[in-house]
Amino acid sequence: MRDIAFTDVHGALPANVQIVLAGQGRLDARFWGDWLDLVNDVSLDVFTEQEAQALLALQGITSEQVVEVIMHLSGRLPVLVHTLAQARPSDVGAVVDPSGTAVERFLKWEIDSARRTAALACALPLRFNEDVYRSVVPPEAADQYMWVRGLAFVTDQAGQCHYHDVVRTPMLRLQRTQSPTRWRKDQTSLAELYQSWRLRREEGLPQEERWTDPLWREYRCNETYHRLCADARKALPEALEEITEACEQDGGSVRRWTQLLSQAAADTADDTLATWGDRLASAPAGEPSTIVGTLGVLLGYPGLPIPGQVRARLVRGRAHRRAERYAQAHADFAAALILAPDNAVAHVERGFTYLLTGQSEQALSGYTRAIEIDPELDWAYVERAQALRMCGRVAEALADVNRALAIDPEYAAAHAERSMIFWEAARWEDAVQEMARAVEYAPPYSWYRLAWLRFLGNLGRHAEVVKHTDAILARAGDAPSGHRSEILAYQGWALHCLGRDDAALSLLTQSTELAGAPPSAFTRYGWVLWEANRLEEAERSFSCALAAAPEMTWAHGGRGITRLYDARWDEAVEDLTRSFALQFGIPNTTAETRMARPLVALVREHMDTDRAAVSAALRLAAIVCVQSEWPGLARSVASVLLLRPSPRLLAGGLRLMREFDETPGGQSRDGDDWTKRLVGPILRLLDRRSLSGDAAEQP
């Protein structure tokens, strides 16, 4: 052919001649390399439905039922559609299974029986590598892996091979129908092979990490598939339970297990599997409804064993709770407890839902019942400790956390809860140390790390925040976007508090540009932009924060100050009123008349004459208002006084701060205590300056 096409051995060809070659493989580059640029490869695929119907119609086959059966049995492979059409079947019963013909055509050039057996055996697994190959082929074909791997209908992806569906489907059907007994035996052997690999993998893998391990998932997936192929009726209940386990992970796992069921249904022609596959495929596809919808299907039909029903109720209840659908969550947890009254986990889950809906006594009752059922359930103690802490029963909460840590000294959540207890008891250093332990025992990107950084920042230990965030960011290349955003925001704010505003602006810009940036990042950015006199950008940043967190007092205050500097007095009063009302738990009218309007009036009066002092005071207020301790407070106040505010401004500031100090905090007792701890020392400092008449004197 090469001589005919490209040499003069047989004479010259006319210029308009086209040569068509059909075959399974491409032209060998060793012989055709000089002319491959003249070759146009055209892949031949299976017929479309319209093409197949057209061919069948030419043969006089128009019955919908007959056409549908031919389509299914042939896989729309042209040669098989043609073969079945040649018989011109008049009804469904006359359509002959073409699997044997198809397999014979795929392997017609191979006369070695060992190779033919190996090719058929390798159709059984979904994918195979050399290890799988050696386990499924007879000993005499053990050295034929490279031959099978090189077959035209085999695709090799990173060492994992799989057959084209058009070839694999008839090969499976042939083996299943020729010898059902051997089919079950071969499928069971493959299931046991993957089971042995899964169990070996589990030896060094903690249980909570199994579903996140790709290799473990691969083994379990294949094990389940082959058990379904071996005995669908026996394996289906366990497979349905596995889907409920997949629902505890993510939508991707759910889709894979659902597709697995559909694949097994197609490969076994089992009607029950096909029905379940169709049901699960019809579940809503969008996150998070994938999980809720799939569990709804599993719970909506008979077939899921009771342990699986309990798990499904718990998983769906958690999903409802995350979406703040508390009534549905309660219903699922209650249903789980009807099925399994002594399920400690169900009692804890319902207790936590009670806690989120403000029913603390019911929550405590649920946690206590869980502990009675399982005294070693460490997280039940932690959940009860949280409820006790929220009820102000700190000593009991601490005792519960200590019990949890006695069960598991490296339980991160217990250390975190003990840290929160210490924090609320103003045991700042103990709180920081406990949260550091939680960070040590938790996964890399847990919220404990963020809480630890927040504690350090709230204590005014900004240099430590910079040091630790530097180390975290250096190894946080794969951190989730939102987590990285928060770390950048903490570092940016710490640098701002240390007076390094240029670096702070750069980091806060990066933070707010990342997906999942929290409202606090936009608020920090807004304050630094305000200080840079970039008022329009600052207001936009504060508004972004408030769109996500409408009751963030810090953001309301920042936007109010920004609007104040933009001479939008009424809007400034509105924002500051909301900020003070939320901070002190007082009515809006009280916040407006006693705090917001006097502050706006004071700043408005002195904006032109004492702008530097006013701005410095507001900057200091923005920093200290989100801290719980204020190291160097006297020095910071003195730095404002060094700007020599006018006596009238100083007097007005004193009056306003006394108002803050004397205003009773409505429902915000913590906010009231915090204000008195902060404002009291400042008032004493300012009173001394006022009495001395020398606002610039050092303390």
Image (cartoon, helix red, strand yellow):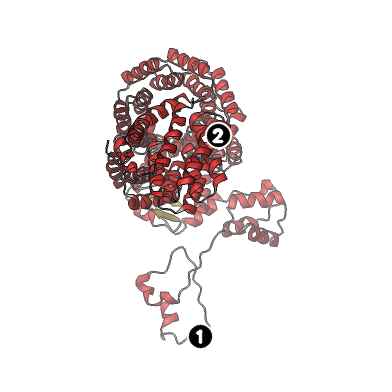
- Quarter of the picture containing the C terminus is top left
**For numbered disc 2, what is the local secondary structure?**
helix
Q: Nearer the viewer, residue 601 or 405?
A: 601
Residue lying at 47% horizontally and 50% vertically, measured from the top left: 538
Q: Amino acid at mark 2?
A: Thr
Compared across the picture, whether 305 is left or right of 414 comes to: right
Q: Indicate the position of residue 123 as horizontal and vertical percent values.
A: 45, 47
**Residue that carries the numbered disc 1 in the rendered image:** 15
Q: Quadrant of the N terminus?
A: bottom left
Observer-nearest of 256 and 532: 532
Residue found 70% across the figure and 48% down from its top: 65
Q: Nearer the viewer, residue 91 or 298?
A: 298
Label 2 neighbour load within 10 Å: few <14, some 14-19, many 20+: few
Q: Position of residue 322 (x, y in %)?
A: 52, 33
* Residue 239 shows in this picture: no
Residue underneath mark 2 = 593
Residue 492 visible in the current orientation = yes
For the point 72% across and 52% down, the residue is: 63
Residue 449 is left or right of residue 163, and the answer is left
In the displayed structure, 545 sits above or below 349; it is below
Determine the CA span between mark 1 and mark 2.
96 Å
